[in-house]
Image: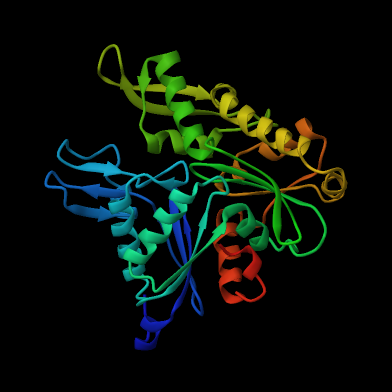
Amino acid sequence: MAFSFKNMFLSQVAIDLGTANTLIYVKGNGIMLDEPSIVAYDKDGEIIAIGSEAREMLGRAPEDIKIIRPLSDGVIADFEATEHMLKSFIKKVQIIRPTIIVCIPSGVTEVEKRAVRDSAERAGAKLVKLIYEPMAAAIGVGLDIAQPVGNMIVDIGGGTTEIAVISLNGIVVKESIKVAGDGMDKAIMNFFKRKYNLLIGDKTAEEIKINIGSAYPLDKEVKTLVKGRDLVAGAPKVKEITSEEIREALEIPIKKIVEAVKMTLERTPPELAADILDRGIMLTGGGALLKGLQKRLQTETNLAVHVAEDPLRAVVLGTAKALENMTTYAKVLI
């Protein structure tokens, strides 16, 4: 990446610090980084890889290399690793002492908020502000959050699914559940273990989810070959699997997300519920790309469901808008 010396001192940065991926937006340059939130350690506890480089090691590293995700269920699980990861990412975009806005799940505690602030400050930030993920997602997809009109957003990330009804710059009703993309991957892994005695890795499960996973019957069901290790024989094994079977594997996490959406709708004030009937539900996050999820939610709620134009980047783009218009969005910043 080519930068002028002046770019090093650009001082405003928006960060989507996600369980699965971290995205960094730099004012004046756009999204400069999109890497997995993964850190690899050697046997002495020294960090040897961060981000994409660490992800390539998943499932292939020897015993003396430990690979972790510093964030779990949308919050910091390993404070030190998160700090090192943020330092590394900020260094990659060549920014010194930035003002940072970081998005966080709507269900975090005060202790978890402080952990995010402290990590960002220790990583070199001179000022840290926070914004709730569903609020950032709503701003990112262009919803007018300041109006007295109900907007419903469902953001399905890696660690959490954030559901919120937003009006007048505030979250009126919210639900944050620890079931999202990672939970879907685990459900697929458990399915293979339980039904076929086949052990597959995280990356393989994610690829299966992306390629043939679905939440609603497909117009044309498909098959694929899955490679793993036979738990009985201990040898490598290949198994042909159908999209129907993967849909069965995903049913529990999908059902939990659908139930959380319904629960949020039940708690929504009548006037705002009427607005949602007119405007529908907006889906963001990587989980929004799961085949058939839009149709499943439409069927279950009898409401229009829309998928954001760029669901993977909706949160960081909304955080960036808040960063560039701090006065306008002052009420939504924490």
Return the residue found at the far top.
232
The residue lying at 56 percent from left, 69 percent from top is 320
Residue 9 on image: x %, y %: 38, 83
Horizontal placement of 262 versus 230: left or right?
A: right
Of 317 and 80, nearer the camera is 80
Horizontal placement of 16 versus 36: left or right?
A: right
Q: Where on the picture, by quarter, is residue 248?
A: top right
Q: Work out which quarter of the rendered image holds the N terminus and state it.
A: bottom left
48 lies above or below 67 = below
Residue 316 on image: x %, y %: 54, 61
The image shows a total of numbered marks equal to: 0
Of 59 and 211, nearer the camera is 59
Residue 150 on image: x %, y %: 80, 53
Horizontal placement of 241 versus 304: left or right?
A: left
Return the residue found at the far front.
110
Residue 266 on image: x %, y %: 77, 35
Horizontal placement of 88 versus 107: left or right?
A: left
Q: Where on the picture, by quarter, is residue 265?
A: top right
The residue lying at 30 percent from left, 41 percent from top is 58
The residue lying at 73 percent from left, 61 percent from top is 143
Return the residue found at the far left.
44
Q: How is the image coloured?
A: rainbow
